[in-house]
Amino acid sequence: MNTAELYVDNLSRQASKKLHPNWVDEDHLLNILAHNAQQYPTEVAMRERDHGIWQEYTWSEYLDNVLCFAAALEKRGVQEGDIVLVIGDNRPALYFGMLGAIALRAIPSPAYPDTTPDELAGHMHRERIRYALAEDQEQVDKLNHVREHHEVELDLIIYDDPRGLADSEDMVAFKTLVDEGAQMLENNPALRDEIIARPSIHDIAALLHSSGTTGTPKGIPLKHGHVLYGVRNAAAAGYFDEGEIHMAYLPIAWVGDFIFSVGAALALRFVVNIPEEQETAQRDLREIAPTLYFCSPRTWSNMLTRIQVGMEESTPFKKWLYNKFMPFAIELERRALEGKQPTTGQRLWRWVGEKLIFGPIKDHLGLSRVERPYTAGEAIGEDIFLFFRALGLSLRQFYGQTENGALAAAQSPTEVQLHTVGRPFPGVEIKIDQDGEILMRGDNVFDGYFELPEDTKETLQDGWLHTGDAGYLEEDGQLVVLGRVSEVVYTSKGDRFIPTYIENRIQFSHYIRDVCVIGQGRDYLTAIVAIDFQAVGHWAQENNVTYSSYAELSQSPEVYDLIQGLIMHTNRVLPEAQCIRRFVNLHKEFDVDDGEVTRTRKLRRNVIDENYKEIIDALYSDKSEIEFEAQIVYETGEVGVFKRNLALRTVPQD
């Protein structure tokens, strides 16, 4: 019995039943898919834009692809408990493939498409992966590299896009397997129902992963029950509705995509729309016109910048309309968040603005039908939040982690506040322990990490998930998240602070892409800032600031003044000990490939401390600039040295 099988055995159905006595065995994803195919066979379940044409899959075709793939996959050797790597961008074949593996009680383990070969090798070694489903030649080449250079025993690679690829003994097209499976089901009709009946609500539906900010990512198994109860809890709170039009564009390795594009899509019969490419997602969004739309604060910020750039390049009349109505609507929304009701005249003027400017902007973005727009992952800037609500989008924040299926709490339409993430969903309990940590329990909470019993004991205690987040509950029951408990640190004077809390407040501005607050064991706090090139570049053009590169723009005195003003604005709402005293604009963005941020752009502080030690030390000196040398590796493999003078700015205290 291999490691994965041992794990499945140790967390068997019987053990799971003791943890979740209210779960019903037959209530699983495959049965739900089969029900949809039987009751709504001709309804569209999924659409993909391919070479400009939308290809549709009905619920009946969805089920056929899953079952045919599962039958052929089993014939190729995949057994219960095997872990199947899934890597690539959002594609129907990858979703069908994950569910095909689930049907066999195997476990799909999705990876980010830009995962490096070294990272992928670690992933595959830890999970004893012998089978992989890849999107295209790029991912297949990566897998072959891993197989050849990292001693990974990979028995079979399955690929979706056939361009540049051909079937061989250890490589086969997804379509080939579907065709093989179709013949098997035709020869043995009973196999179809037998495959559908195999899974249980207590089986693992997906092996997802933590971000790995402090080390190796942890495997986080989510069972059918965790996924379904999370979705149903959210639906009971009005977070989802049946028949949503949804765009699947976020990485398949992220928990939110599995919950939205698989779990909720099956349970609530979403129409899942897949853009042609990641680069065309915003263009395709307009054609899709979803009713449900989630994106990170960073993406909302980028959307705002695009709107601003577009208006600057528009006609004088359109610019006049925008400048006439937008500030009015933003102020109206600001007052609404303070509990103040608009007058009849303001409502009428708002209606005129909807017809002339707000509606056309939403239509241009593809958000004209969105009824449930959400954001999560980090705090969203006040200006961004107010802007989109002023457009008429009921933008709300929610809170969740991979360990709780991404769905734990959210703001209701009538209780929106900038500093809260809302109330717990029905079926979810939240409390704060004596150390200020957020604890949670419910059927959406996972049962333990993959092969990490000690970490599981630390995280799951007496039935409660220790989220690792610091926060508090307000008197009305709304949850406020401050940051990671592990990141609570102290200055040399003993002043307590949470870097992420301060960073989030600074990043309320869309001019700042990333910021790292320094100060542990130091006399005061400083910050390393990475500007947002698109937003600051647009600002520079409006203010006649010339530049030829990111590095040059970041070091412009005018840009330093801009960032200084933003930091001063943040300092005004922080305790004196948590105010930023000095900062530097970095010559580049924090880079995933340099290990400075994760793929979800969470900071790896130990790497940043090491990479920028000279800059950090200079921030705590009387220097006004530093010549910084950094090693760079070109695409050819050659190594060079980058030198740049970076200004160090002291922030005036009000």
Image (cartoon, helix red, strand yellow):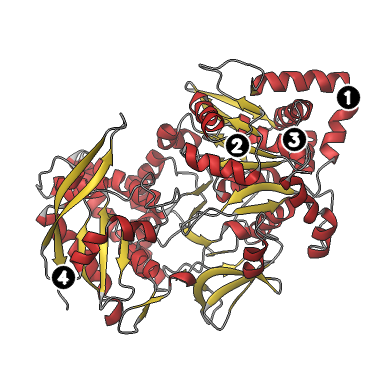
Q: Is residue 619 in sight in this rendering?
A: yes
Q: Nearer the viewer, residue 346 or 198?
A: 198
The quadrant of the picture occupied by the N terminus is top right
Task: Compute the Cα span from label 1 to label 2.
Answer: 28 Å
Disc 3 + disc 1, Cβ < 8 Å:
no
What residue is shown at x 47% (from left), y 22% (from top)? 52
Q: Nearer the viewer, mark 2 or mark 4?
A: 4
Q: Secondary structure at mark 3?
A: loop
Q: Nearer the viewer, mark 4 or mark 3?
A: 4
Q: Amino acid at mark 1?
A: Pro
Left/right of residue 279 with respect to residue 22 in the rendered view: left
Number of residues whose C-alpha sits closer than 10 Å to that of mark 4, classed few (under 14), some (14–19) or many (20 or more):
few
What residue is shown at x 81% (from left), y 44% (from top)? 199
Q: Percent x, y for residue 464?
A: 66, 71
The residue labelled by disc 3 is 40
Q: Nearer the viewer, mark 1 or mark 2?
A: 2
Task: Compute the Cα span from label 3 to label 2.
Answer: 28 Å
Q: Percent x, y for residue 288?
A: 50, 35
The residue labelled by disc 1 is 189
Q: Amino acid at mark 3?
A: Tyr
Left/right of residue 394 with respect to residue 432 in the rendered view: left
Label located before the other in sequence (3 or 1): 3
Q: Nearer the viewer, mark 3 or mark 1?
A: 1
Q: Is residue 511 in sight in this rendering?
A: no
Label located before the other in sequence (1 or 2): 2
The residue labelled by disc 4 is 621
Task: Using the image, tell me which numbered label, if any, was put on residue 86.
Answer: 2
Q: Nearer the viewer, residue 56 or 479?
A: 479
Task: Using the image, tell me which numbered label, if any, was put on residue 255.
Answer: none
Q: Amino acid at mark 2?
A: Val
What residue is shown at x 53% (from left), y 62% (from top)? 399
Task: Compute the Cα span from label 2 to label 4.
Answer: 49 Å
